Image (cartoon, rainbow, N blue to C red):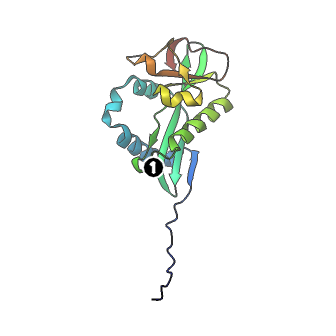
Amino acid sequence: MNAVAVPVLAETVPPVRILRETARDVRAIDALVLAAFGPGRFAKTAERLREAAGLAAGFSAFEGERLIGSVRLWSITVGAARSVFLGPIAVEASSRRGGLGADLVRACIEEARRMGLDGVLLVGDPPYFSRFGFVSAPEAILPGPVDQRRVMWLPISDAFPVGPVRAAG
């Protein structure tokens, strides 16, 4: 028996690129976020805040030309602290568990530092976000019902997140 080795070509997967969000990304981002969170997200306090706040920055993750992840930062203040509100983070189901969500969070943190802000606020899972340096923000008062245990702050300056959370331009 003579065996012949047949080369098997492995499918090449394009590298994931995280880029600044552009206007042409918006429709795909909206569809991705809706698929990730469903229509129930529209009832949340975080969504009300995002609707009122100005978009400070957004990041889109692409595999080739396909959008597979997104995150946005919204301009807010927390008391006297100049900040951004992070979220939502959406990653296509087939691309989860590879660290893309963490990469998107890191892009947001770098952007907030570049902007010279006091910190980043979010409503999220403490075990997940604490690894990036987020801490509990019990004195940040969102404009509606929220599980206060999930309100978190990443300090960039010495300012504390104390007081009402308000949308900013």
Judge from the rendering whether residue 131 lies leftward or rightward of residue 27; answer left or right: right
Amino acid residing under circle 1: Ser
Establish if 129 lies above or below 96: above
- Residue 107 is drawn in which quadrant? top right
Is residue 80 visible in this depiction of the protein? yes
Task: Residue at 51%, 11% (x, y): give it.
Answer: 139
Judge from the rendering whether residue 59 lies leftward or rightward of residue 91; answer left or right: right
Task: Residue at 40%, 44% (x, y): give it.
Answer: 32
How many discs mark residues in the rendered view? Answer: 1
Task: Residue at 51%, 45% (x, y): give it.
Answer: 23
Q: Which residue is mark 1?
A: 95
- The percent position of residue 72, horizontal first and vertical second, equals 51, 35
User: 4 and 89: which one is in front?
Assistant: 4
Q: For mark 1, does the 10 Å Cα neighbourhood hold few (<14), some (14 to 19), or many (20 or more) residues? A: few
- The percent position of residue 88, horizontal first and vertical second, equals 45, 34
| The residue positioned farthest toward the front in the image shown | 1
| The residue positioned farthest toward the bottom in the image shown | 1
Q: Secondary structure at mark 1?
A: helix
Task: Residue at 43%, 16% (x, y): give it.
Answer: 148
